[in-house]
Image (tube, grey):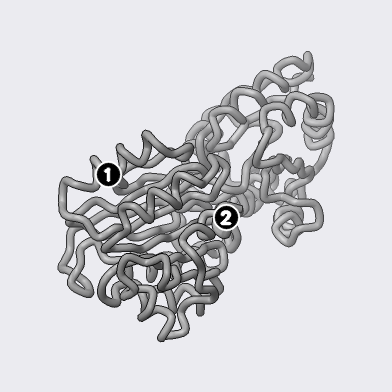
Amino acid sequence: MTIKVMIVDDSAVVRQVLSAILNKASDIDVIDVAFDPVFAIDKMNRHWPDVIVLDIEMPRMDGITFLRKIMQERPTPVVICSSLAEQGAELTMNAMAAGAVEVITKPQLGLKDFLQSGERQIQASVRAAAAARPRGAVAARAKESAQGDTSVMAALPVSVVTDLAGMAHTTDRIIAIGTSTGGVQALEEVLANLPRTCPGVVVVQHMPEKFTAAFAKRLNDVCAVEVMEADSGDRIIPGRVLIAPGGQHMEVQRSGAQYITKVFPGPAVNRHCPSVDVLFRSVAKVAKKNASGVIMTGMGDDGAAGLLEMRRAGAKTFAQNESSCVVFGMPKEAIKLGAAEQVVELSDIAGLIKS
């Protein structure tokens, strides 16, 4: 009997490589793939798989929430395949408790090579899952028999998950940087020394409207990381730097297990739009200890209070020292508030935040 498999993963590379690996086996057939659980729900109601290969970190709805809903309505063997599923990690235990029958830990780097080298293990995991009998399966079949065919589409709301109850952790990290006078040169020095493997970076540089796009393009030409002017919905990923557009505020939000930007017009905060405080406060709220905050050269006090909120939320926080600042205003105010965990030279900032 052929094992019908659905792959649910937001990475196109993972979907492609896993499909190729599984389809090599004569007894396994990948019947469909989906970018996230919301897309998967509709596809699964049309063609229900024998086994689901499921990522944890995805937009709109995280894998743990999706797994719990599937097990409540139509228990199906699930293989978790995620970089977050470290052996012995709390989230792995949560996945198993929710009904996952197998867990494959994938690395964040060298992913394609890892999947290809683990071809036999992955195929064996799918076979083992297909032979499993998820808890609640008998009750679910009895319910179907008594009530007729029940669509999981009706049982699973496709609304965006925003309360994060099912997904308290994510492997993504964020670096938030705020700067003003003197920041153009200072940012170039920091960003030019970041590798493409560094965490995603969000930046507020006090700058007039229409100037930030050209600034981002110039930085992109001289940096290993990708630098771009931010837009709403941009995902914050390793190796990418998103700069708030002049004349608009920028916040960080969560979408499922991922971080994205929200860009919007609004009144000036601390006399500035974009405002560093607006960015830092949003990072403190959604990223907490997964974030690092850096306040650099600039006049005034924008960002000082927000950096303090980040520190209280568990983030690592840094302030540029006086000797390397063009204007020691913003860092000075942050230091006075106790917002900076460390006061550092400009030349040291890239090394402190890149790993």
Residue at x 53%, y 53% (from the top left corner): 257
Assign a secondary structure to mark 1: helix
How far from the left and from the top, in percent, is residue 177?
40, 60
Q: Are the residues at dot 1 and dot 2 in contact (C-beta closer than 8 Å)?
A: no
The residue located at (63%, 54%) in the rendering is 68
Residue at the image point whose x is 54% and y is 76% from the top: 341
Report the residue at 33% width, 63% height from top: 179
Compared to residue 109, the image places residue 252 above or below, namely below
Horizontally, residue 111 falls left or right of residue 119, namely left
Image vertical order of residue 17 relative to residue 344, above or below? above
Q: Which residue is mark 2?
A: 351
Tag shown at residue 247: none
Q: For residue 88, what is the image quadrant?
A: bottom right
> How many dots with numbers?
2
Residue 243 picture location, percent across and down: 33, 50
Q: Is residue 50 left or right of residue 215?
A: right
Q: Is residue 250 left or right of residue 59?
A: left
Find the residue positioned furthest to the front: 323
Task: Tell me which corner region of the image, top left, top right, bottom left or bottom right, holds residue 322.
Answer: bottom left
**Lower position in the chain sequence, tag 1 or tag 2:** 1
Q: Secondary structure at mark 2?
A: helix
The kind of residue tagged 2 is: Gly
Q: Which mark is residue 215?
A: 1
Q: Is residue 61 visible?
A: no
Q: Can residue 314 be seen?
A: yes
User: Residue 150, position in %: x, y?
Assistant: 55, 43
